[in-house]
Image (cartoon, rainbow, N blue to C red):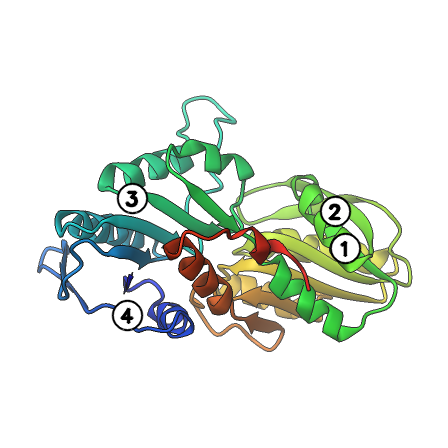
């Protein structure tokens, strides 16, 4: 087994490699004067089971292109199997044609990964489940839920209610509610622009309860903070958030700090773009991903990784 990493999130890749009982393969990554990416795998990978770790987070185009070139390099170096490990799958929000003359970019990314030579995909908390169907290769889809549930249980919160910040997150909220033996509620929202969201109504009772907003990703924190204000008005005793992929920019951090949310728990699936502030707590998914990589390499089931203990 050989584990490779791009430049997107090398710290996470090093933690994953260490948890998997090895170290990262030597890869030389540089840029030509015109900005073109050059990659050379400095170790022999012929006949090896290769795992390439690269979240396609900010800047998504650079990181995606780097990943594709690394896959091509491994394929031409005669790797026996290439698994693309994307802790965060970029462009996942563009998963359907919801207006005229727009692309389905999540499908385009899937096509590019397969065309480059990917034999298998390992990813976590896709924005839309149907993205797995965009691939004609095996997809192992992990969830951060075991990490979050363990942490939330340690907080010993009473009268817990799991809240979906929009109607699209209802299924995720219901799954968390089952695992935490909690109530469930949902916030209805209206998106005014890419950065401005207005929460319009709440379905469910949160009065006097400890509310936890759950979502797969956030960048501007508009949806979360709008939902949190509505929960505060509805009488929630405390408001927390659990978000798998924190793509927070500086404006998002500022919004979060000014909101009623007392803590946002997230993972290290993507690197922080700016100072995350006092309200964000980062939990590592390195052990989860490392275990999945080892199981894939040994041709064992990854289903048990979904179980909550």
Element at badge 4? loop
Residue 24: numbered disc: 4
**Which is in the foreground here, disc 1 or disc 4?**
4
Q: Which residue is mark 3?
A: 118
Q: CA distance from mark 2 to mark 1?
A: 8 Å
Residue 65 lies, in percent from the top left, at 25, 49
Q: Quadrant of residue 149?
A: bottom right
Residue 174: numbered disc: 2
Q: CA distance from mark 2 to mark 3?
A: 33 Å
Task: Using the image as rendered, state which of residue 192 and residue 244 is in the foreground.
Answer: 244
Q: CA distance from mark 1 to mark 3?
A: 37 Å
Q: Which residue is mark 1?
A: 162
Outermost residue, top side? 100
Q: CA distance from mark 1 to mark 4?
A: 38 Å
Q: Are marks 1 and 4 in contact (CB under 8 Å)?
A: no
Residue 101 versus residue 181 in the image, above or below:
above
Task: Using the image as rendered, state which of residue 20 and residue 53 is in the foreground.
Answer: 20
Q: Are marks 2 and 1 in contact (CB under 8 Å)?
A: yes
Q: Quadrant of residue 50?
A: bottom left
Q: Are marks 2 and 4 in contact (CB under 8 Å)?
A: no
- Residue drawn at (86%, 56%), measured in percent from left and top? 206
Residue 262 lies, in percent from the top left, at 71, 71
Q: Are marks 2 and 3 in contact (CB under 8 Å)?
A: no
């Amino acid at each position: 087994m050989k584990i490779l990493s791009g430049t997107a999130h090398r710290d996470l890749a090093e933690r994953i490699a260490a948890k998997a009982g090895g170290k990262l393969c030597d890869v030389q990554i540089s840029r030509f004067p015109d900005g073109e990416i050059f990659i050379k795998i400095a170790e022999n990978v012929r006949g090896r089971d290769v795992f390439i770790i690269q979240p396609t987070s900010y800047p998504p185009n650079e990181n995606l292109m780097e990943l594709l070139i690394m896959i091509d390099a491994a394929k031409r170096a005669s790797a026996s199997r290439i698994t693309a490990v994307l802790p965060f799958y970029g462009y996942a929000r563009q998963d359907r044609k919801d207006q005229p003359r727009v692309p389905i970019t999540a499908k385009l990314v899937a096509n590019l990964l397969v065309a480059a030579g990917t034999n298998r995909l390992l990813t976590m908390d896709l924005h839309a489940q149907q993205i797995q169907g965009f691939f004609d290769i095996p997809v192992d889809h992990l969830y951060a839920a075991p990490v979050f549930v363990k942490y939330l249980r340690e907080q010993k919160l009473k009268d817990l209610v799991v809240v979906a910040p929009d109607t699209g997150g209802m299924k995720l909220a219901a799954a968390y509610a089952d695992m935490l033996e909690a109530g469930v509620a949902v916030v209805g929202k209206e998106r005014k622009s890419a950065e401005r969201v207005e929460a319009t109504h709440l379905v469910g009772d949160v009065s006097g309860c400890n509310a936890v907003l759950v979502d797969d990703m956030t960048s501007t924190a508009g949806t979360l903070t709008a939902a949190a204000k509505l929960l505060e008005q509805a009488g929630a005793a405390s408001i927390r958030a659990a978000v798998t992929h924190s793509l927070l920019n500086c404006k998002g951090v500022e919004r979060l700090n000014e909101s009623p949310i007392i803590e946002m728990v997230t993972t290290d699936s993507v690197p922080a773009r700016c100072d995350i502030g006092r309200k964000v707590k980062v939990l590592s998914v390195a052990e989860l991903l490392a275990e999945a990589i080892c199981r894939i390499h040994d041709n064992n089931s990854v289903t048990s990784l979904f179980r909550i203990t």
